Each structure stands twice: as C-alpha cells, then as structure tokens.
Image (spheres, grey):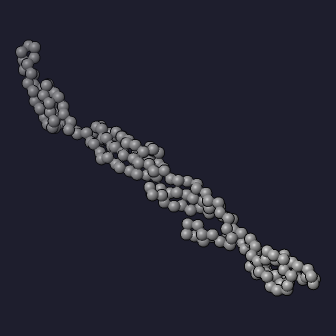
Amino acid sequence: MTVRLWNTITYDSSGVYVDTLQSVAGCDSVIVLDLTINNNCYGDTIVLTACDSAVWNSITYDSSGVYIDTLQNISGLDSVIVLDLTINNSYLEDTTNLIACDSAEWNGVMYTLSGVYVDTLQSIAGCDSIVTLDLTINESYDDVVDTLYRCIGDSALLAGSYQTLSGVYVDTLQSLQLAVIV
C-alpha cells in the first residue's frame, strides 16, 4: 500500500484534504491537497521450466535462477515481475557406430542400408536428446555353390578339414556360405 506524508499527516487513500495554517503575520492560510494514490503493482511470480534457454521480456536466459524485472505502469509507478526459471539442457550428439550383417534394429527401427541416421528422443527432463547411428551393413551371401574336381588320391580342405571322399560339404564363413561338391 502506498502512503503519502503531508504536513506531518500520513494519508493512505485518495481524496481532497484541507489544512489551515497561520502565517507569520498571524493570518490564516488555507491549503488544499488533491491527492491521488496509485498503488504499486506487484505482478505474479512466473515459474518456468525450459530446455536450453528461455526468452522473457525480450531477454534470453540460458541458466536457471530468479530474475526480477521492473516495469512502469500507465501512472508511472513500478510493477515488479519475478521469473523463477529452471533451465534443463538437451543432450546432443551421442553417436553409436555399428557394423551389422544384412540389417540392424536401433531405437525400434529396422535398418537394411548403410548410412548415418539421427533420432531425437525426449529426456526425463522433457528436453531433446539427439542421438546418431553410423551404420555399416555388410550383406551376407547365401547358397554360393562351387564345384571342385579332384584327382584320385588327392584331398581338398573343406569345412575345416581335408576331405578325400566325394560329397556335398557345407561350411559357413564370415560373410559367405559355401557349399562344395567334390
């Protein structure tokens, strides 16, 4: 509440006040006070949570804190506004390097082509977390059949051991499956 002191009297409301004073010559002097009281305006406290930064009253804030701004109302009196700001930071650029055969699943998505993939997730604080997948897909080969002819008494290294009899031998190699008829 705003108060005004006039001639040793405190006034806390608008009005017309009259006081009679005696001059040095002994004559009365009448003075009139036409008083208008404008109460200071105190605004609310604004509680705000933001990611990385926030703009308030044309100012960008990038750290948490309590900020106060004083404005003037139409009567020229101050209005005080308080900002209680919490800044949560985003988590950027977490890169996963992955090499897979044929396909890979990442964050619930199946990928079959090599490439760099970006996903935006929401952190527990409600801010973005940007993660990157650098994916290399190596395709596997199926049913590669190679025929090998041998002479009687010879052998061939197949399926991890030397084979001396004719037959079909299957061996799985990294990135290649080989079926051989001897």
- x and y percent of residue 114 in the render? 68, 66
- Residue 141: tell me if it is visible: no
| Occupied quadrant, residue 171 | bottom right
Left or right: 131 in relation to 33: right
Q: Is residue 133 visible?
A: yes
Question: Within the image, what quadrant is residue 38 found in?
Answer: top left
Quadrant assignment, res 111:
bottom right
Task: Give the camera-side residue of 126 and 3.
Answer: 126
Please name whichever residue, 72 or 124, is drawn nearer the observer in this view of the structure: 124
Where in the figure is residue 68, as x and y percent of width and height?
A: 36, 40
Residue at the spot x=84%, y=77% of the render?
Answer: 162
Left or right placement of residue 76 versus residue 101 in this view: left
Percent position of residue 18, x then y: 10, 30
> Residue 71: x, y in percent?
34, 40
Q: Nearer the viewer, residue 42 or 28?
A: 42
What residue is at 13 percent from the left and 25 percent from the top? Answer: 8
Relative vertical location of residue 65 with respect to residue 102 in this rendering, above or below: above
Up the image or down, 59 lies above or below 136; here it is above
Residue occupying image coordinates x 92% and y 82% = 153
